[in-house]
Structure formats: C-alpha cells, structure tokens
C-alpha cells in the first residue's frame, strides 16, 4: 500500500535490537499508540481494508491485539472477544497449543464467546511466524464461527507467517 498515511505509521514504529533476546529486532508499537493521529489512522486503514466484509465480532489476541482489536471493534460498531494466555479467562474455555522456537505455548477462548455462523476478524499487532494467529483461528472455528479475515498492523513477511494462514484473507498495513 503506497500512501502517505502508511509512511506516517511506519515512522511511528521503533526498532529495538536484541529484545527480548539477542538476534530479535523487536517492532515497538508504543510510539504509534502514544500518537493519537497515528493510532486513529491505523484503525481507519484497517477498517477501510475490511470494508465490504460482513463482520459480527472482532477477536483480539493477548495482549497487543487487545489495543488494536478493541479500537477496531468500536470503529466497526461490533463486539470484541479476547483470546488470552492460559488461566486468565474465568469461565469454561477451549485451548489451542502452538509451537514456539523452544517448546509450546497455548491460547484460550471462552466456549460461549461466539455463536455458530458468526463471521470474525482476528486482530494482532504483528504476524511473525504465524503460529499465534493460526492457533487463534483454530479456537474461533472450534466455537463454530467463521474466520472472515486476519488483520495485522505489521507483517514480518520474510518469516512467511502468512503461509500458515493459506486459504484465509490476510490484511497488513506495514510489511517488512
Ligand atoms: P508469531 O506467532 O511468530 O506470528 O508471533 C506473533 C506474536 O509475537 C505477536 O503477538 C507479536 O506481538 C509477537 N512478536 C513476534 N515477533 C515480534 C517482533 N519482532 N517484534 C514485536 N513483536 C513480535
């Protein structure tokens, strides 16, 4: 997407080398969040890219997906459902496990969070290897709902995370 608004958003992402460990170039979104123009623009652009899709619910992935997901849900005028790290959601949950570089991690959703046939957009700040997003898609489908789209502020394309989401619509604003 070539757009001066995109260039502005890109200028609000800070690269932090070797965080959380050596060799990782961390994309820090806190300057973007602190800039109301940039934060609003990011939500507007994601909403524009989703335009025309019938959507019933926004799913936000803990924790940076909550910030963008909740703002997007407000913008679209639909509800928000959190997907959380294990042990955080109080009622009965479904759990999906996914591979990390070393070992596995898991995410949970409330079993009654979605109704069959609802169309959802899954939101996170960034897609890297795609494992987190894929596990979230599995949780949504276990609830009987349909993944209409995945939406990210940032896509680290060189990690090919999108390949794990083959067959799904994937939107991202800033590609690296
Ligand atoms: P993945 O499952 O590999 O796609 O990882 C995606 C999750 O890890 C997202 O929730 C991101 O916030 C976080 N993440 C992974 N790599 C980075 C990075 N280089 N900079 C910032 N966040 C990252």
Image (cartoon, rainbow, N blue to C red):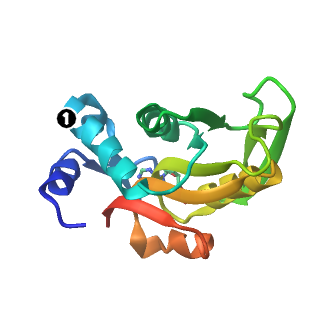
- Asked if the residue at label 1 sits under 8 Å from ligand 1, the reply is no
Q: Could you tell me which quadrant the N terminus lies in?
A: bottom left
Which of the two residues, 57 or 61, is positioned nearer the viewer here? 57
Residue furthest toward the left?
4
User: How many residues crowd mark 1 within 10 Å: few (<14), some (14–19), many (20+)?
Assistant: few
Residue 59, located in which quarter of the rendered image? top right
> Residue at position x 57%, y 63% from top?
130
Please state if 90 lies on the left or on the right of 55 as rendered: right
Q: Position of residue 155 (x, y in %)?
A: 40, 62
Q: Could you tell me which quadrant the C terminus lies in?
A: bottom left
Asked if residue 163 can be seen in this view, the reply is yes
Residue furthest toward the top?
90
Q: Position of residue 134 (x, y in %)?
A: 65, 61
Residue 104, located in which quarter of the rendered image? bottom right
Residue 78, located in which quarter of the rendered image? top right
Which of the two residues, 66 or 18, is positioned nearer the viewer here? 66
**Which residue, given by chain and number where applicable, does mark 1 sit on?**
37
Q: How many marks?
A: 1
> Residue at position x 83%, y 38% from top?
111
> Residue at position x 52%, y 71% from top?
162
Callout 1: SS: helix
Asked if residue 154 can be seen in this view, the reply is no
Q: Position of residue 131 (x, y in %)?
A: 63, 61
Please state if 103 lies on the left or on the right of 170 as rendered: right
Quick check: 139 above or below 167?
Answer: above
> Residue at position x 56%, y 76% from top?
163
Q: Position of residue 24 (x, y in %)?
A: 41, 58
């Amino acid at each position: 997407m070539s757009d001066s608004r995109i260039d502005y958003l890109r200028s609000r992402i800070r690269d932090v080398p070797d965080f959380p460990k050596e060799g990782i170039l961390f994309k820090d979104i806190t300057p973007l969040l602190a800039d109301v123009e940039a934060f609003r623009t990011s939500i507007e652009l994601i909403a524009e890219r989703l335009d025309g899709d019938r959507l019933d619910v926004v799913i936000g992935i803990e924790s940076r997906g909550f910030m963008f997901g909740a703002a997007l849900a407000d913008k679209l005028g639909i509800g928000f459902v959190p997907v959380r790290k294990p042990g955080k959601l109080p009622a009965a949950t479904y759990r999906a496990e996914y591979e990390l570089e070393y070992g596995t991690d898991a995410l949970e959703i409330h079993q009654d969070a979605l109704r069959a046939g609802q169309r959802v957009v899954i939101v996170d700040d960034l897609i890297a290897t795609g494992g987190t997003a894929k596990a979230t898609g599995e949780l949504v489908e276990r609830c009987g709902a349909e993944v209409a789209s995945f939406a990210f502020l940032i896509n680290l394309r060189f990690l090919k995370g999108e390949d794990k989401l083959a067959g799904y619509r994937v939107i991202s604003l800033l590609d690296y």
